[in-house]
Amino acid sequence: MSATSALSGNGPGVLRCRYEHLWYVYEDFVTPAAVVHRGECPHCNHGQGHGRGRNEHENTWHGPFTSEADAHSAEIRSPSRMRDCRVCMA
């Protein structure tokens, strides 16, 4: 099941999920590298990041994914540079 169909809304900006965890991939085009996060990670914030602004030419978030394996299979520019977050996946 895709993450999109697993989500249900309850008002603007509020998502509920039938899964315990959702995963996201942060991709940095400058480095280049990608980091897999659990949605509840403070660095991920459910795919919103730190809220310090976003530049689609420098970085992007992929997801949500309903499994860690799906997140690791995300289509990114540098798959060999993908790693797990040292905060939420340690």
Image (cartoon, grey):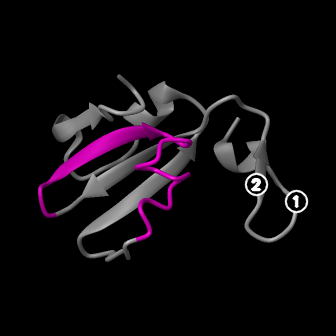
Which residue is at the front of the view, 78 or 48?
A: 48
Which quadrant of the rendered structure holds the C terminus? top left
Marker disc for residue 15: 2
Report the magenta residues as a range.
30-51
Q: Is residue 81 left or right of residue 57?
A: left
- The percent position of residue 3, horizontal first and vertical second, equals 66, 44
Mark 1 burial class by Cα count in 10 Å: few <14, some 14-19, many 20+? few
Which quadrant of the rendered structure holds the N terminus? top right
Q: Is residue 13 magenta?
A: no
Q: Is residue 32 left or right of residue 20?
A: left
Kind of residue indicated by mark 1: Asn
Mark 2 burial class by Cα count in 10 Å: few <14, some 14-19, many 20+? few
Q: Quadrant of residue 54?
A: bottom left
Q: Is residue 49 left or right of residue 40?
A: left
Kind of residue indicated by mark 2: Leu
Q: Residue at x 38, y 76 (%)?
A: 53
| Residue indicated by mark 1 | 10
Q: Which numbered disc, 1 or 2, marks the residue that appears first in the sequence?
A: 1
Asked if labels 2 and 1 touch by Cβ distance under 8 angstroms, the answer is yes
- View extreme (top): residue: 90
